[in-house]
Image (cartoon, grey):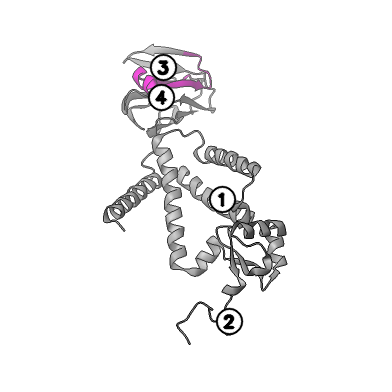
Amino acid sequence: MDPKALVIRYVMYVLMGALVLGGLLGFFERGGAEDARGATSRVEVSWPKVTRQGLFPTLRVTYDNLGDRPATPRLAVEPRYLKTLQVDGATPDPVEVVPVAGGLIEYRFEALEPGATLEAWLNFNIDHQAERFRVRSRLRAALGADTPVDREISTLILP
Amino acid sequence: VELVIRAAVLFLFLWLMLRAMGKRELAQLNPFELVLLIVLGDMVQQAVTLEDHSLIGAGLVVSTLALLTVFTSWLSFRWNWFARLFEGVPTPVWRNGKPVERTLRLERIRMDELHAEARKQGIGDMQEVYLATLEEDGSISFLKVDQAPDEDGQDPDDKSVV
């Protein structure tokens, strides 16, 4: 057999093996998460850390109202993040979406009764026109006056 | 991870399905079966990749299927029992001037199909045939009576032993 053909064959085996191994180890799709507790709330956030063009990732927040009065769940991220990941809407429908301090866009949901839980998420629809490969944003998840999550997140978009 | 697992499961399922269909069916698809196979391919693609239209996703599925194909081919080369399990074994459909009814029935081969296959290979009369075998790839090979081994099992063309 032609030595060049053999080289191509083995190089392809290695490349395909690396690709499959990378997939199995989750290198091409991974999420980040944070679970934080405030004085009267508990908030769990998960976001796509590594995703791919053509996928539909979500940014999820679960709010637990541990206080004794109703509180408004709020989720704020940078507009650039929403634009790059091509936000497709929020579930459940927010009561309002407003720009807030720090250049963030805030989603405000229906007030949560004491002891109640709400799971809210932003749907993304990343097509092949995604503008950049890595996008960072400040993420703030608050319940009433409590802001248990206030951090930087980043998402890598692979082809 | 999900894409790799889906592709691997589908590889196994397709292998079982193709083995269940029988060798002959695959070698001789009629137009309807051909269209069915194309539709099946489209459905399979949707089931494996779901909503994933990414370049890496496609690479993952293709690589998984290609590596599994290479791996099973290596296993077949290494172990005969695996080759028999994975690729099947040649099965006689005509022996000593008579059809092997059970194999013909199991593989759903009609006598006129067998005759047609013989004609394609320049054999006009089945009485000229000593052995017809349904090969692993679904084709039928023919050995004529004059190619049959002697009673002591020796090939008539083999002049090495006098």
> What residue did someone put label 2 on?
B150
Which is closer to the viewer, label 1 or label 4? Answer: 1
- Viewport quadrant of the C terminus of chain A: top left
> What residue did someone put label 4 on?
A141
Spatial CA span between label 3 and label 2 = 90 Å
The disc numbered 4 marks a residue on which chain?
A
Q: Secondary structure at mark 2?
A: loop
Near mark 3 (Cα within 10 A), the count class, few <14, some 14-19 or many ≥20, is many
Spatial CA span between label 1 and label 4 = 47 Å
Which is closer to the viewer, label 2 or label 4? Answer: 2
- Read off the magenta span: A72-96
Q: Nearer the viewer, residue B43 or B116?
A: B116
- Residue A106 is tagged as 3
Q: Residue A124 lies in what quarter of the image?
A: top left
Q: Position of residue B136 (x, y in %)?
A: 56, 61
Spatial CA span between label 1 and label 2 = 42 Å
Spatial CA span between label 3 and label 1 = 49 Å
Q: Secondary structure at mark 3?
A: strand
